[in-house]
Image (tube, coloured by chain):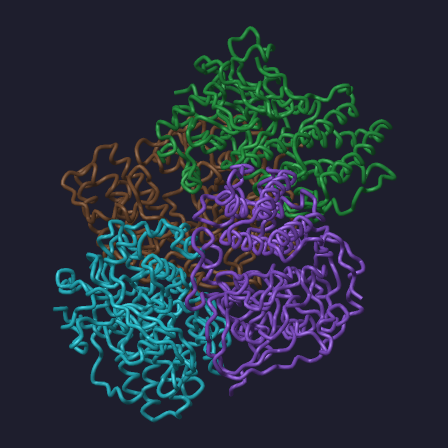
Chain colours: A green, B brown, C purple, D cyan
């Protein structure tokens, strides 16, 4: 049986999740809880330019509410520290100058304690404002801020994992012996390809309930017939690719991917050790589970694996069509594993009883799609500073779908579009195979 | 009146263009003719890693026929020099090791004269083989080789332009005083947006006649309604963007584009001088023609301009739908101008008589589309080494359509997909605006 | 009057400084005291590749005693943590592999608390061993370790100053309002050049008492006649150089220096602000004192200034000859100012009573010499791992002499040779002018 | 017997070498002769940032006479092309802006033919001026220009060797089968160390006859006793160092040297092939001669070899003292070998008859000294633009002495100071060992 998740990762309870205030309290509390296993030292360091210190995540997410809700919309709000706007703005060019991203790790001041006070200060004002009630258009910004916060919950875990992996002591973020999944994991059944006929489909968010601007508008697409594997690619399958000299055969790779393999000396997923028997996880070094989904591969690796396997990656439209009938459930942050698990752990995920194994469409690992991240037809960014949220990243990145074991469950949707550069590996990215059925 | 093109650029005549042999002779002769205005010194130097020396283009295109036609398919063929395979392979990993691209400019040997002898040697064997007749599947490789050669004709001109632009003497590739188009160019009429209804369209090549593998298979797409401008964006319009501080406003740019602008210090198209009154062309420095299409802009600049103009770039599907009824004609290499011209030069391009101005869909400048370069549904690369021709570049690049004033006319098709990285500017790339019509 | 230095910087007292044990206790305590104004967050971050985190300095200096004294020479010593040898070795290739220098800032574990425990563990064992007595050759290693520790005391302050200067909040290391020296500082008298005749001189350490291997052997040199300024170059004088376009005139610069100025965009000393009216110090931003010595200039700047002033930098031999009769005293770490001060602060430094102003030969700022750092004739490095201490750096660096306001007084000698690369500026480096007297 | 050198390298004869005009004619003719085996293509390409194209050398040396002699001092001189001053200035900041060094290889125009015409134009004016007679101070500039030209003769050969070595065809600069020295070379006798007593010596140029400004003033130095090997280190000896894992033992290396070895992957001298049996020379690939001096090693390698051998490199003062009684003769450019040869080729170099082998102090290879390149006491650069000739390079470089097989004999002096950065290897640099004799 899988371990009961340790306390810091338990969903803070008691909040009325059907109110914005309730959700605000729960989500904000979870962020702080994620930082609890870390020392102030752990929270200040930036291990690479793409990552941010945990302290920065804690402060930036509070800054978001101060900048976009409290200052413009709550009369009498007192800014906690005027310098924080400069320090903790992320990329909103229109909001003003900001501290350069690669230097976030130099901010030993303000201290972790001051940042937590900043959070309390913001929370206090926010909770009072939410209790009093806010106009709907401001409530919408709060909702956006909460989804923003959830994104940073995942980023915080990604960044902490990277930081700890750089330490020769190989320390664990959380130390759970009971999480040793090796012996109990079960080899999944061979993947089946589920077919879908050609035709016009509708994808994208219809605007009922929250979504990011990049998920809409809902629109029609014509798809040729296609088929999707009914589970993720496993570590065992990926090992076959490695052993078949997958990293040494240029014909399997995109040109840019091959150049990256050469320059970086890649020969295995990020966090695997040289013996290919162990990987680094948020619980420290652990035995590589052959049945678990492969994780921390780049787009280039996912694409090369698919080519080697005689298949391809799904388009994001195909993925979304397949996901539409499925419940948004799976191995998410709230389950406390913080690591992908095999498709047959039915006892842990009873909602899938009746099936022989989980499809793993949601949770476990983000699934690379073959789709460059582009605007949908008719896409309009939000007005003002928040318009920089998504649209300006629509070049050179690829879409991933479905969420991962470090994604909050309540953050996920079937229309959700995540995106990373094709060489990036520190996000929890894995592989689902697709095929065309037409010949 | 526009000048009669100088001799080197006249289409070599006398060949029977309806035979493969005839086309072979004509195209091969044109390549050599393009190098004639250049000294051996001009032909050996590589001005940047993305460019190649003219000599390399001359040799590589001969190598293609030796490697893929003569050696495997023509009995008794004697390889000209076994070392050339290493020197002049471009990127075919499966064909063997090769000279690193950024070092192409170090090859002072073999000499220009030897490379021309290599071409003669290959031409001699090819012409005899073509006269005797080749099996259809080999003929198809020859056809591919000719289209490959035409691509390198354009690359040769792009690379020569870049090389000469780096020289403080600002020398001309061809010196034609009569080409001064300034006084006679006419301001185009205001751009009209031509609307297309939503619906299912077919795009892609149907396989009748030659095409590259990436142009097919022909397939259905669903498009929302859209509209396309009936001419290209002009230098005058782009100047307005510059004067409106277009290069200084981050909100107009993609995030990666803004970073590039900052790093590179871009504030105008490539080849424009600081005064914004002159540009460098293949005929040397010339006055900037406000009526001519803007050229040598990156994808980032095209995208930012479109946003500033309240429009967007067309998707490649939209472009192709609009191009389908049009004749593949315009200001091409064979016209000898080697520079884009305004939309109203009716006397030069009489095929458009009856219209008030040319649509410029074909020729003049390649048109950036908003479409990342991806495989069509059901795409299959060619088998063997030639399979590396297109597919492996399908990441991180954007599609351009329509050909330019340095593209051979007979090389162009409505389904033709060119592609460059979004930061690249030395190709002849320009802008056509699009809009959605749905609101 | 200058302020009483704040407590952390008071020399820990009560130790019998005439015993090795007494010196050990005092020096080790001072290192810990220097870290006291810092949070654990301040101590973990590395602000640039040349710098190290304060925690690393704390641990590395303890590792030195464990590695070179306790483990090989003290029976029964239990290594605190075997992994620390890898983490905290600096550059001793012969001692084993080590954590890469630019990644020192990733070591959030071991924690600051654990490192302080490591120090206590080592101190406990060392003090017991020293109390029991150690053979002379081991005592010599302890002596070396203490001088090593003092070097890291200065490095710690240099590195902390750099780290804090990177923070937009501009925090102070120690906050002493009473240190405002501006109003009380006095303009020094014009510099006089003190002449020395040509002849044979002896320089280098004679081996009586401690010295580093690079200070010997004592040897004869022939010097042409020369003259040395009787005080340091001031901020006011350096401002004249700046205002005379010193940073814009290539003829004043060494070729490599000019290239550095261009690449780095230098136009003033490190830590000066753009207005040239303020500098960053260990007590935070402060008004630039025109009477204080210029500090944080590179060799290139010192050399260009000297050329502009019609003088040159002294050779290290010249400097040492001039220093031989002088007492090793001045504005040192123990004085607690942590900042250079003008030459006329007689009340603070009464030992120079009788002179009109201090020569500043010792303390305040390290003085760049024109001497590349090379071995003396007959130089022999120490045997074993400690032989890597000095000799292997004898290329591409320049010698600085005399110590600075962050150097412990008891660490300094007239024969002491410090060395940095000519582009480096974060050490407390300043300028004394020299001239030849021969014409 | 060694081959008669091929014609291009024969010293042009018929000139009266005792007149400035005669020397001018001879030296200028030799430069052109050195370019004769090269095609225009060979002459235009720059193979690395440190090298220059041969055409650039041809033009720059002519520019020197135009800039510093003809334009200021010869009435009625007509500048050949005003743009050439910009193109062919090397580093004289005071003379005006100039074409960036790394872009010298982009100058396909002016053509090789035009550059040769430029040389003729300058020569014509110079010869007429010299025949008429020039004031002594102008004659001194001409003399400097001729020594400058001789430096570029050597640079031209160094740069050509590098360029040809980058070509996979491995072409020869001159093709002389008769030069195969392998079978006839003789193993030198074991090196003897010649001792010199401690004392005051005089070094530096006394000003009688031509010298560069950096060779003076002549001055006294005190040297400890020392000893110098009576021949150069051979390839065979260097091979022993390699086989003893010299490139894998950090304790043998300076810290910067070790970093360079790691970064560059060095494991043998430049131009040696992987088998350690062959090297690339100006006559193409040739068998490594174990008896010949090792060549094309960096300072770091020379220093590491010396440490491995239990010796050290000589100081430049020591070298000069030892060289003072010796004739300035040896294997120089005029001998036409263009490659270092063993110490016992007495028949070729009869001036050393009576000795068992040559000391190789002059010619063959430049000898790395342990001396950083610094000004002598009392050094004064030339006034005006020519003052940039030497002084501004006095940082970060090391002195080499004695000239090489590509140095013109008439260019060499015992006081001559050459200098390169310690990582550079494309100059013909080798090793002579030294020892202290004091213990």
Residue D349 on image: x %, y %: 18, 74
Residue D106 on image: x %, y %: 40, 62
Which corner quadrant holds the N terminus of chain C?
Answer: bottom right
Residue D233 on image: x %, y %: 27, 63
Position of D129 with respect to C59 (left or right) is left
Depth check: C243 or A134 in front? Answer: C243
Q: Which image quadrant is residue B97 in?
A: top left
Depth check: C164 or A243 in front? Answer: C164
Position of A428 with respect to D34 (left or right) is right
Q: Which image quadrant is residue D137 in?
A: bottom left
Q: What is the count of numbered marks? A: 0
Determine if residue B305 is in view. no
User: Residue visible at 85% across and 30% down?
Assistant: A128
User: Residue visible at 52% across and 50% down?
Assistant: B297
B97 in relation to D155, above or below: above
Depth check: B386 or B243 in front? Answer: B386
Residue D325 on image: x %, y %: 28, 81
Depth check: C141 or D313 in front? Answer: C141
Position of C429 with respect to B183 (left or right) is right
Position of C258 with respect to D319 (left or right) is right
**Residue found at the far top of this picture:** A354
User: Residue visible at 72% across and 42% down?
Assistant: A111
Determine if residue B144 is in view. yes
D123 in relation to C273, above or below: below
């Amino acid at each position: 049986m899988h371990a009961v998740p340790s306390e810091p990762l338990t969903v803070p309870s008691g909040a009325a999740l059907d109110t914005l205030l309730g959700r605000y309290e729960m989500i904000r509390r979870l962020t702080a809880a994620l930082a609890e296993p870390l020392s102030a030292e752990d929270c200040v360091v930036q291990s690479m330019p793409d990552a941010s210190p945990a302290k920065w995540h804690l402060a930036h997410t509070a800054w978001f509410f101060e900048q976009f809700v409290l200052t413009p919309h709550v009369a009498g709000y007192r800014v906690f520290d005027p310098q924080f706007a400069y320090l903790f703005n992320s990329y909103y060019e229109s909001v003003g100058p900001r501290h350069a991203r690669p230097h976030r790790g130099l901010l030993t001041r303000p201290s972790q304690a001051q940042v937590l006070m900043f959070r309390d200060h913001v929370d206090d004002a926010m909770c009072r404002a939410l209790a009093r009630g806010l106009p709907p258009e401001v409530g919408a910004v709060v909702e956006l801020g909460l989804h923003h916060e959830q994104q940073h919950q995942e980023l915080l875990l990604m960044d902490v994992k990277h930081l700890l992996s750089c330490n020769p002591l190989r320390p664990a973020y959380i130390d759970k012996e009971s999480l040793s999944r090796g012996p109990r994991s079960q080899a999944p059944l061979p993947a089946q390809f589920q077919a879908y006929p050609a035709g016009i489909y509708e994808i994208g968010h219809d605007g009922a309930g929250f979504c990011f601007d990049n998920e809409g508008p809902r629109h029609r697409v014509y798809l040729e017939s296609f088929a999707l594997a009914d589970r993720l690619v496993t570590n065992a399958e990926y090992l076959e690719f490695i052993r078949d000299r997958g990293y040494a055969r240029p014909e399997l790779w995109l040109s840019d991917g091959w150049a990256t393999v050469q320059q970086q000396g890649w020969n295995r997923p990020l966090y695997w050790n040289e013996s290919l028997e162990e990987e680094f996880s948020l619980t420290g070094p652990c035995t590589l589970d052959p049945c678990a989904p492969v994780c921390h591969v780049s787009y280039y690796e996912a694409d090369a694996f698919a080519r080697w396997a005689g298949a391809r990656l799904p388009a994001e439209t195909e993925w979304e069509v397949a996901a539409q009938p499925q419940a948004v459930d799976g191995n998410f942050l709230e389950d406390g594993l913080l690591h992908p698990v095999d498709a047959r752990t039915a006892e842990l995920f009873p909602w899938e009883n009746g099936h022989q194994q989980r499809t793993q469409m949601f949770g476990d690992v983000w699934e690379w799609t073959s789709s460059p991240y582009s605007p949908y037809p008719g896409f309009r960014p939000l007005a003002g500073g928040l318009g920089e949220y998504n649209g300006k990243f629509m070049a050179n990145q690829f879409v991933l779908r479905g969420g991962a074991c470090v994604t909050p469950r309540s953050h996920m949707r079937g229309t959700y579009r995540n995106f990373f550069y094709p060489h990036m590996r520190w996000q929890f990215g894995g592989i689902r195979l697709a095929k065309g059925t037409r010949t």
